[in-house]
Amino acid sequence: MNLDLKERISENGIVIELKGELDIFSSPTLKDKLYSLIDTSSNDVIIDMNDVTYIDSTGLGVFVGALKKSRQKGTNIVLKNLKPNVRKVFTITGLDKVFRIE
């Protein structure tokens, strides 16, 4: 399954809505999008993961890299609406302590 990305502006920052699976095949697309947004905007990036059904280590790596980049710039990355199986991956890896998850 592919990963679909939709971008919109909200009062809290730039919202990226993801749908599908975040894995080794789809991660480069997300990485390019996130890094570009972080480079060109001073807004926080909110990632709505309501429709993400799967994430692997490659996907986690994209988020970690993007978080590091955003912190260097003084902005935040917020993850929202994680399904239980996706949230479990963040919990097992300890990344639930690093990311702001709503």
Image (cartoon, rainbow, N blue to C red):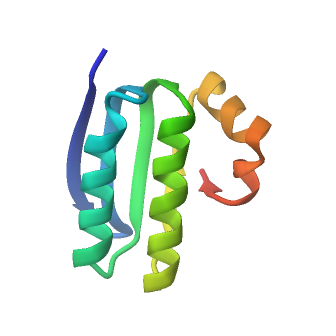
Which residue is pictured at 32% across the width and 82% down the height? 42
> Which percent across, then down, holds residue 82?
56, 35
Coordinates of residue 50 in the picture (x, y in percent): 45, 32
Does the image show residue 10?
no
Give the side of residue 10 with respect to residue 86, left or right: left
Side (left or right) of 40 relative to 90 = left
Residue 2 seen in the figure: yes
Q: Quadrant of the N terminus?
A: top left
* Foreground of the two, 24 or 80: 24
Residue 7 lies, with reference to residue 84, above or below; the image says: below
Q: Position of residue 83 (x, y in %)?
A: 57, 27
Q: Position of residue 85 (x, y in %)?
A: 64, 22
Q: Considering only vertical position in the picture, is 87 above or below 46?
A: above
At x 71%, y 30%, the residue is: 88
Residue visible at 68% across and 40% down in the picture: 90
Nearer to us in this view, 15 or 91: 91
Above or below: residue 60 compared with residue 85: below
